[in-house]
Amino acid sequence: MSRVNENFLKLPGSYLFSTIGKKVKEYQEANPDKRIIRLGIGDVTLPLPPAVITALHAATDEMSVQDTFRGYAPDLGYEFLRSAIAECDFRRRGVELSIDEIFVSDGAKSDSANIQELFSADARIAVCDPVYPVYVDSNVMAGRTGTYDIASGRWSNVIYMPCTAQNDFVPELPEQVPDVIYLCFPNNPTGAALTKEQLQRWVDYANEKKAVIIFDAAYEAYISREEVPHSIYECAGAKTCAIELRSFSKNAGFTGTRLAYTVVPKELVLDGVALNGLWARRHGTKFNGAPYIIQKAGEAVYSEEGQKQVAEMVGYYMNNAKVIYDGLKAAGYTVSGGVDSPYIWLKTPKDMGSWDFFDYLLSQANVVGTPGAGFGPSGEGYFRLTAFGSYENTVEAIERIGRLS
Ligand code: PLP
């Protein structure tokens, strides 16, 4: 008799965005004349850059001609894209990678969920709290996390690293030693970033403890400060302890187009086994390559024009981030993030709970954000706003919030 994977049954309901959606729908139905502004979800809104559209059209035309038609893409990605990545994202920042260390995929979400397959069933994971939920949930499905305690919102076998105002939303090295450490910087949801010096401490720690860091750099394009590294491999020794995840979603607007990559350095060896070979084997078995058309679109991101257009898009969103950050500060809020990240993390006023503040903002300002508690217990009392809306809506939302105080 076949039986289900009972680990799935342990997952608490993923109710964050569905609850938000339900509450917004109910409010709108009861108040049809109100114009709601959504600064909640982390999806981009600007269209794809022209250089990307041109490449998509050209690649589509190639697919219509016998001589240039392409079938299955190479498992690890086309060389033209992996070479462009190695040159533009790494060599220009002083990091040498061979293209066999770069694995092209259809998203950082899937990569961040799948990467845990490389580790033993009893590997102990460490995550920031609050956290992008995929890291924990994918380990729950793999049966690695122990039991869930509803009262604390925590798994018994997961090491949580609280990121709070006390530590400037920068996690401290954990007391218990993990095997796998998930770090996402610039961070979703807090918007915090690590300086090179701060990240170097993690790299040294991981090398000392023989732990592996999964470094999610999906928001790398938003880094503005000089002292913040764009890749973990800018830190000495990172190639022996870190895997890096990147995405085209937030820099180039590919959330609906789907393209990402993961770096697994050849020097990263556990128990005498190179993780690069394992990931290549896994990729080859479970993934049949990102579409040619989309990889050509990704290549266009690295063209001179593409880089200029992508920088403009990021600049547009970061201008929104500044509007939110400055506007909330002026209105008396305690605010962080928004400098190296499209996320602004604010302390709810008067110790209001995250969800109470959500209801308050929805009903009083008709603005939607994301309650911090939805990202983990340490997110309680915080609220996330995103810079991915239009400039006009962002300005209006912040004016409305300002009028409340
Ligand atoms: N990693 C983090 C931290 C994210 O916030 C997101 C999306 O919101 C992703 C990964 C997913 O990226 P992708 O669109 O490439 O799947």
Image: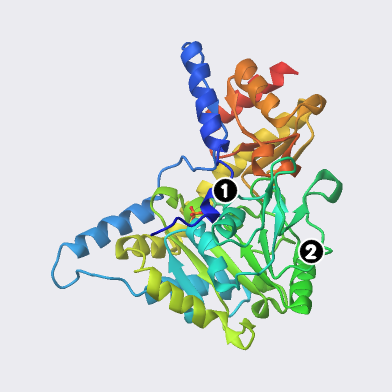
Image mark for residue 11: 1
Q: Is residue 89 above or below residue 362?
A: below
Depth check: 373 or 82 in front?
373
Q: Quadrant of residue 40?
A: top right
Depth check: 136 or 111 in front?
136
Q: Which secondary structure lies at badge 2?
A: helix
Along the horizontal axis of the image, is 109 left or right of 355?
left
Rendered-image quadrant of the C terminus: top right
Q: How many marks?
A: 2
CA gap, disc 2 and disc 1:
33 Å
Which amino acid lies under the numbered mark 1 shown in the image of this protein? Leu
Residue 195 coordinates in the image, percent (x, y): 76, 61
Q: Residues within 10 Å of mark 2 (few under 14, many from 20)?
A: some
Q: Residues within 10 Å of mark 1 (few under 14, many from 20)?
A: some
Depth check: 200 or 202 in front?
202
> Between disc 2 and disc 1, whose residue precedes?
1
Q: Residue furthest bottom?
A: 272
Image mark for residue 339: none
